[in-house]
Image (cartoon, grey):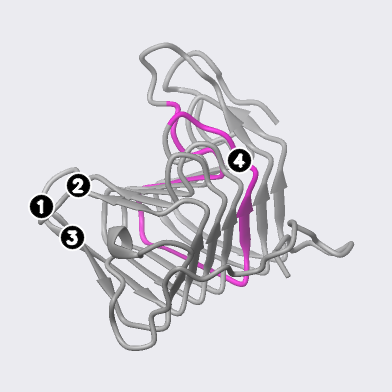
Amino acid sequence: NTAGMDDASGQGGGIQNNGALVLNGIVVVNNTAFNGAGVNSTGVMSATFSDFIDNATSNVPNGENSGGGLRLSGPTSLSRSSVARNTAKTGAGIFSAGPLTLTNVTVSSNAAHGMYLKAGARIEYTTIYSNATSGIEAIPSGGAFQVALRGNIIAAGGCAFTPVTAAIVSEGYNLSDGAGTDCGLGATGDVTFADPLLQALDNEGGSQTFHH
């Protein structure tokens, strides 16, 4: 599907949500839009066992062109889902300006940014791998917020945070292939300079795309 590609009216190439959206076992793939190519959500959203893959925003000069996979401004939770191989100028995987919770999610091979956060987030047991520019970038849109990390793999692309206004807090048991200081690692159970030994993305013929 294609929404308008040359101005900000083109939102939500695959799904536009302005209310309450619940997705279960859904694949959102190969959509295009100015912003929010896969999903543009201004309301409440939750997704389980779902894939957001191979979506792309337009590349208009001076345009925001954000949220290749998902562009979110309302409370959102994703679990046992994948956000992979999406393309955008900002937040290729996920662009979020609302509260975000990720649990057991794969965010991989997005260009650029796996996640671009303008509001607080809680990220648990999630694989953030091989995203261009950075795995997680946080830029506040007004006021301080916190990003909490627990039990994640963050490799082949780290974190970029604006000091003070966007605080990153490790709750432990994260793994990084680098020093991990950019992602605030250093809590109990955090492991740094470790190869996660991930294989290529695969969906094994099903709806979920992930790394072994």
Q: Tell me, yes or no, whether the highlighted magenta stretch contains residue 72.
A: yes
Q: Residue furthest right?
A: 205
Q: Earlier in the sequence, mark 3 or mark 2?
A: 2
What crowding class fits label 3: few (fewer than 14 Cα within 10 Å), some (14-19), or many (20 or more)? many
Residue 86 disc label: 4
Q: Amino acid at mark 2?
A: Pro
Q: Which residue is mark 3?
A: 145
| Quadrant holding the C terminus | bottom right
Rendered location of residue 139, percent (x, y)? 24, 45
| Quadrant holding the N terminus | top right
Residue 143 disc label: 1
Asked if disc 1 and disc 2 are in contact, CB closer than 8 Å, the reply is yes
Q: Which residues are magenta?
A: 65-89
- The Cα atoms of the two marked residues, 1 and 2, are separated by 7 Å
Tag 3, which secondary structure?
strand
Q: Amino acid at mark 1?
A: Gly
Q: Amino acid at mark 4?
A: Asn
User: In this rendering, is residue 26 above or below 37?
Assistant: below
Asked if disc 3 and disc 2 are in contact, CB closer than 8 Å, the reply is yes
Asked if disc 3 and disc 1 are in contact, CB closer than 8 Å, the reply is yes
User: In this rendering, is residue 142 above or below 50?
Assistant: above
Asked if disc 4 and disc 2 are in contact, CB closer than 8 Å, the reply is no
Q: Tell me, yes or no, whether the highlighted magenta stretch contains residue 178.
A: no
